[in-house]
Image (cartoon, rainbow, N blue to C red):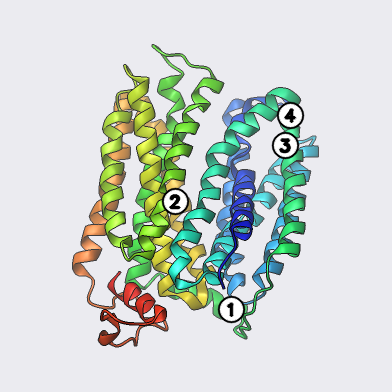
Amino acid sequence: MELTFGRRALFAVVCAVAVATVYAAQPVLAQVGADLGVPDAELGWIVAAGQLGYLAGLAFLVPLGDLIDRRGLMVGHLGLAAVGTVLAAVAGRTWLLLLGQAIAGLFAVVVQTTVAYAAALATPDERGRVLGTVTSGVVVGILGGRVAAGALATAWGWRAVYSALAALLIGLALLVRTFLPPDPRTDHASYRQALASLGRLFGDQLFVSRGLIAFFLFASFGTLWSGLALPLGSAPWQLSTAQIGLFGIAGLAGALGAARAGRWADAGLAHAVTGGALVLLAAAWLAIAQASWSLWLVGAGVLVLDFAVQAVHVSNQHLLTAAYPDRTSSVIGGYMIFYSLGSGLGATATTTAFAATGWTGSSILGAAFAACALLVWTFSRRSAPRGAGLRHSPYRTAPAAACGAAGASGQRERCGARQA
């Protein structure tokens, strides 16, 4: 079926709000610490609780999308994520806030169910465009959510952030139930079989190569966004938190501009887009490294970096959902495990590098992660035999003749997945 603009927009908004529940704590940590008496050294656990819940959800909840009605799953997960944000909003003790964060993060994996469902509903010819639109919502949630959370906390306190998220999650659950079509699939596999299927993906070359690219891609992304406040808040700039947040607008513009990557992927250019975007990613760090003397170069570098990250992310998901159309939830959930681990590595490593060698060291680290992703892309392209990575795909038996000039859309999709 062809997805209408309204349904694509709803998918994107669900992604934006759900992912914002994981990152909402970052700009309000100081307020939370002052209110609940949390020492500065322990504030990181508030963010970590959401991230750990999210990681658990990727492994154990997302595969459910290959077994049961994904519309119903989205409604349930949105409602349970709202429960977590309500607990966080009313928390009078740290342990209750951590519990709320963990629950919200656990069910924030509705993002991956949403992406997988959108990809499954889209026709092969529009899948890339749909993925570009829907995953743009993730970027809005990560970058724009921080700006919105900071503004709400400044006006009404940190509890207002979680209260607003709870209201939005409940409202979206009702909209999903009303306006999205039910999932027509009937899959009689067991939950254990779904988990086993997810595990087998880690032995597949296409999945692992795209996962490793995502790992290094988001390690580079995490290096930037977890470390950028350090040089900008120091001499000679000494920018305020609000001023530093404005760089998120440049990143948001770059990432939204990469929604076009979905159309390029539909045209069979996903592999070329990945390589070109990874080159841009490495080059962006040359500009970002100049933070000691030029904010304009930093802004330009942030824009290019986020464009590159989103372009690769959309291309990766396009190739994987085309190769594994029968289990899009499992493949997206497994792929995002690489994303989560890479983001965590970048966030941890950038502060260590900055403490040792300043922003120059962090920039070299970010560029090195980008170079590693480019090496994985190059090596996987050269070493993959024809049809590699499609052992578990129903397309693996597509005859070579299907890659001819004339063919139905299904043949073109098989050919595109094979050549990826």
Locate residue 152: give its quadrant. Answer: top right
Looking at the image, which residue sits at the far left?
382
CB under 8 Å between callouts 4 and 3?
A: yes
The residue positioned 64% from the left and 47% from the top of the image is 17
Label 4: element kind: helix
Instruction: Residue type at mark 1: give it.
Output: Arg
Sequence-earlier tag: 1 or 4: 4
The residues bearing labels 1 and 4 have C-alpha atoms spaced at a distance of 41 Å
Which residue in the structure is indicated by mark 1? 192
Residue 211 visible to the viewer: no
The mark found on residue 36 in the picture is 4
Q: State which mark lies toward you, 3 or 1.
A: 1
The residue positioned 68% from the left and 50% from the top of the image is 104
Taking 131 as reference, is 62 left or right? right
Instruction: Residue type at mark 2: give it.
Output: Ala
Sequence-earlier tag: 4 or 3: 4
Instruction: Residue type at mark 4: give it.
Output: Leu
The residues bearing labels 2 and 1 have C-alpha atoms spaced at a distance of 36 Å
Q: Position of residue 225 (x, y in %)?
A: 45, 35
Observer-nearest of 82 and 114: 114
Sequence-earlier tag: 2 or 1: 1
Q: Is residue 364 above or below residue 411?
A: above
Q: State which mark lies toward you, 2 or 1.
A: 2
Which residue in the structure is indicated by mark 3? 94
The residues bearing labels 2 and 3 have C-alpha atoms spaced at a distance of 39 Å
The residue positioned 45% from the left and 36% from the top of the image is 251
Which residue in the structure is indicated by mark 2? 259
Q: State which mark lies toward you, 2 or 3.
A: 2
The residues bearing labels 3 and 1 have C-alpha atoms spaced at a distance of 35 Å
Q: Position of residue 127 (x, y in %)?
A: 47, 66
Sequence-earlier tag: 2 or 4: 4
